[in-house]
Image (tube, rainbow, N blue to C red):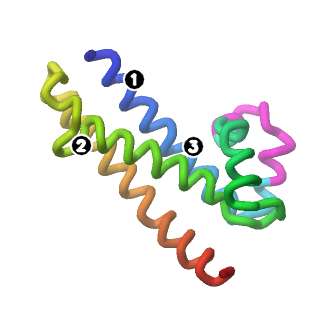
Amino acid sequence: MYWGCICLGAAGLLTTTVCTARFIISFFPGLEKVAEQRRWQLPWVAVTLYDPLLQPVRRRVFGQTQEGDLDYAAVALLAVICSLLETLVGKDGMLNDFIPDFALLHALQWVIIFMHGQLLPAWVLVVLRWGRQI
C-alpha cells in the first residue's frame, strides 16, 4: 500500500506538470508546432508525453482541428486525475484508513492542493475562451 501511494502521488505530479505545460504551450501555435515536429527531443518529449492519449479526445470530444486552439483535453485529463486522487486520498478519501504513514497521506493531500492550484487558472481560461466561442 505504501509504494502504491508513492506511485499515485508521482503519477499525480507527472500528470499535473505535463498537462499544465501542454495547456500553456497551446497558447503559442508556433511553439506547439515545434513541439510536434521535435517530439522525441529531450525538452519536448516531456510536453508531448500524453499526446497519444489526448489526441482522440481533442479531435472527437472537443472538435479541435485548427491550430491555435487551446488544449481543452489536457485540462480535462488533469481534472479527471485530480478528482480521482481527491476521491482516493482527499479529506474524506476512501483509502485514508489504509495508508500506513500519516506523512505520506499529508504529502498526497499537498499534491491535491498543488493540482487544484494548477487546475483553477486553467479552467478559468477555458471557460472564458470557450464562452466567447459559443
Given the current orientation, which residue lies at the most extreme front position?
60
> Of callouts 1 and 3, which one flags the residue occurring earlier in the amino acid sequence?
1
Asked if residue 114 is positioned above or below residue 30 in the image, the reply reads: above
Residue 74: image x %, image y %? Answer: 59, 51
Residue at label 3?
Answer: 18
Q: Residue at x 35, y 49 (%)?
A: 114
Q: What amino acid is at disc 2?
A: Gly
> Of callouts 2 and 3, which one flags the residue occurring earlier in the amino acid sequence?
3
> Of callouts 2 and 1, which one flags the residue occurring earlier in the amino acid sequence?
1
Given the current orientation, which residue lies at the most extreme right position?
37
Image quadrant holding the N terminus, namely top left
Residue 53: image x %, image y %? Answer: 67, 38
Q: Residue at x 21, y 38 (%)?
A: 93
Foreground: disc 2 or disc 3: 2
Cα distance between the residues tagged 1 and 3: 16 Å
Q: What amino acid is at disc 1?
A: Cys
Q: What amino acid is at disc 3?
A: Val
Q: Number of numbered discs present?
A: 3
Q: Quick check: is 70 in the magenta stretch?
A: no
Mark 2 neighbour density, 10 Å: few (under 14) some (14–19) many (20 or more): many
What range of the chain is rendered magenta? Answer: 33-46
Q: Is residue 43 visible?
A: no
